[in-house]
Amino acid sequence: MEKPAASTESLGPRPVLGRESVQVPDDQDFRSFRLECEAEVGWNLTYSKAGVSVWVQAVEMDRTLHKIKCRMECGDVPAETLYDVLHDIEYRKKWDSNVIETFDIARLTVNADVGYYSWRCPKPLKNRDVITLRSWLPMGADYIIMNYSVKHPKYPPRKDLVRAVSIQTGYLIQSTGSKSCVITYLAQVDPKGSLPKWVVNKSSQFLAPKAMKKMYKACLKYPEWKQKHLPHFKPWLHPEQSPLPSLALSELSVQHADSLENIDESAVAESREERMGGAGGEGSDDDTSLT
C-alpha cells in the first residue's frame, strides 16, 4: 500500500498568512499546527462545559479576524473512528446539518486533495462556501487533518454564496486509550464580511460546542452505518482506492481574502428564529438520518 508521507525538509513553517504559492504541507507544517493546537498562551477561554472547551484569540494584524479553538473529550470513540468520520464525505452529508453541498474535486498526492464545501450561516446572514487544499497525516496513534483556501479555475465564486477564506483550519485527534480520544478543532477563517458581534459570540458560545457534540454523536453511530455503506472503502487510508482525478499543483493558486468581495453584514440583526433556537443555520438535533 502506498503510504502517505510529507517532506522531511527542515525549512521551518511556511507563514500561512504570507503563503504565495500553493504547496502541500510538509512535516514542519504539521508539527507547527500541532503546537498551536496545544498552546495555551494568548488564548481566552470562552466556554467550558461537559468535556467541551472553546478558546478565542484576536489576530493582531486584524482585530476583527479571530482564531477559534474547540476541544472535546470523546469517551467510547477511538481516535481512528473520529479520523474516519472527518474524512468520510458521504457520512458527513448525513450528520452535518449545516452542509449545503460538499464534494472532493481532485487528488494532489496520497495525502492531499482539493474539495468544495458550502454551509448555512445563522439567519439572516448569507451562506458561505470555500475551496480548500486539504492534507492529512497519521502521527503514531494521533492524526492531523488541515486545510487552507485555494482557487480552482473551474470553481469560481458563486453569486448566491459568499466565498469565504480558510487561512488555516484543521483537527488534531489525540488517542487517550483504545476507545477514547481528544479532538482539537483550530480555525482561522475570513468569512469575507464585517460580521455583527452577536455572530462572533454565538459561534464561540453556542455553535462551536453544538457542532462538536453533534460530531460526537455521529462518531458513535459511524461503525454501524459504515458496515452498510461500502465498509472497506476508505481512500484516506488506502490511496489506491481513490476515484479522484489527479491534479497538478500548478493548476491551483492561493485564494487571498483581499481579492474577494467584502460583504458588510455588521448591522444585520439576529432573526427571531435564531434567537428562539430554531434550526436556521444550526441544524436539528434529530439524528435519525444516521442510519
Image (tube, rainbow, N blue to C red):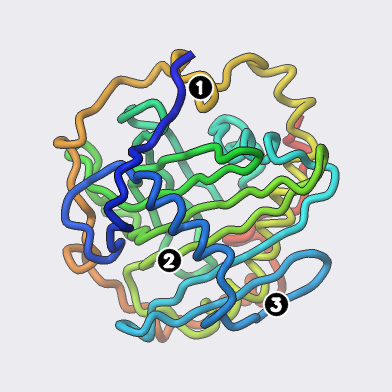
Mark 1, secondary structure of its residue: loop
Q: Is residue 125 above or below residue 216?
A: below
Quadrant of residue 283 within the rendered picture: bottom right
Front position in the image: 58 or 267? 58
Q: Residues within 10 Å of mark 1 (few under 14, many from 20)?
A: some
Query: Left or right of 42: which side holds 261?
Result: left
Q: Amino acid at mark 1?
A: Pro
Residue 88 in percent (x, y) is at 57, 32
Front position in the image: 261 or 91? 91
Q: Residue at x 36, y 84 (%)?
A: 60
Q: Amino acid at mark 3?
A: Tyr
Q: Earlier in the sequence, mark 1 or mark 3?
A: 3
Q: Earlier in the sequence, mark 2 or mark 1?
A: 2
| Inter-mark Cα distance, 1 to 3 | 35 Å
Front position in the image: 178 or 113? 178
Quadrant of residue 94 within the rendered picture: top right
Residue 27 in percent (x, y) is at 40, 45
The label number, if any, that marks residue 188 in the structure image: 2
Q: Residue at x 37, y 86 (%)?
A: 63
Mark 2, secondary structure of its residue: strand
Q: Residue at x 46, y 23 (%)?
A: 3
Q: Are marks 3 and 2 in contact (CB under 8 Å)?
A: no
Query: Left or right of 67: which side holds 77?
Result: right
Q: Amino acid at mark 2?
A: Gln
The residue indicated by pointer 1 is 235
Mark 3, secondary structure of its residue: strand
Residue 121 in percent (x, y) is at 50, 62
The residue indicated by pointer 3 is 47
Query: Left or right of 173: which side holds 154?
Result: left
| Inter-mark Cα distance, 2 to 1 | 27 Å
Q: Earlier in the sequence, mark 3 or mark 2?
A: 3
